[in-house]
Image (cartoon, grey):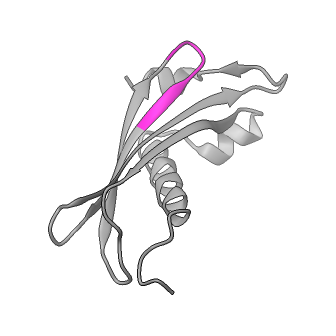
C-alpha cells in the first residue's frame, strides 16, 4: 500500500534465511523439534537502513555468533542485489529449550564457531 516492504515482513525474511543457513550446516530444524529441542528467539535488534520496494531482489546474509553458555546469535543483513546496498542490519539472539523447558545451546550450534 505504501510502496515499501512492511517492517514486520523482515522478520520472515530473516527467519527463512536462518533456517536455510542451519540446513546448509546439516542442522535440521524440524528434526530438532522432533527431539524436543526447540530453537527460540529471545531478542531481536533491527536497524532499518533503507526500505525495500516491491520487485526489489535481495539477499539475506547469516553469520552465527556465540553469545553465552545459554544463548547464541545470528548477525544478519538484508542487501539489495542491484547495488549491494545494506537495507537492514540485525542481531537475532536465541536459545534452545529442551524437553524439560530448560535453556541450552545444542552441541551442533556450538560447533558452528
Q: How many tags in the picture?
A: 0
Q: Is residue 34 magenta?
A: no
Q: Is residue 22 above or below residue 58?
A: above
Q: Is residue 71 magenta?
A: yes
Q: Is residue 21 above or below residue 93?
A: below
Q: Residue at x 61, y 44 (%)?
A: 29
Residue 60: name its quadrant. Answer: bottom left
Relative to 108, 25 lies left or right = left
Q: Residue 99 in the image: x percent, y percent?
A: 82, 27
Tell me which segment is drawn in magenta.
68-74
What residue occupies the far front of the structure in this picture? 2
Q: Residue at x 36, y 78 (%)?
A: 53
Q: Residue at x 31, y 56 (%)?
A: 49
Q: Residue 50 in the image: x percent, y percent?
A: 31, 63
Q: Residue 67 in the image: x percent, y percent?
A: 47, 20
Q: Is residue 68 above or below residue 46?
A: above
Q: Residue at x 34, y 83 (%)?
A: 55
Residue 88: name its quadrant. Answer: bottom left
Where's the C terminus, which quadrant? top left
Q: Nearer the viewer, residue 63 or 45?
A: 45
Q: Nearer the viewer, residue 27 or 96?
A: 96
Amino acid at each position: 500500500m505504501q510502496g515499501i516492504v512492511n517492517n514486520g515482513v523482515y522478520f520472515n525474511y530473516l527467519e527463512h534465511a536462518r533456517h536455510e543457513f542451519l540446513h546448509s550446516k546439516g542442522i535440521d530444524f524440524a528434526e530438532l523439534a522432533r527431539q524436543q529441542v526447540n530453537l527460540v528467539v529471545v531478542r531481536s535488534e533491527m536497524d532499518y537502513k533503507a526500505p525495500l520496494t516491491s520487485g526489489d531482489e535481495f539477499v539475506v546474509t547469516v553469520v552465527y555468533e556465540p553469545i553465552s553458555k545459554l544463548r547464541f546469535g545470528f548477525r544478519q543483513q538484508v542487501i539489495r542485489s542491484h547495488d549491494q546496498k545494506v537495507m537492514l542490519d540485525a542481531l537475532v539472539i536465541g536459545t534452545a529449550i529442551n524437553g524439560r523447558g530448560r535453556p541450552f545451546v545444542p552441541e551442533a550450534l556450538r560447533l558452528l564457531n
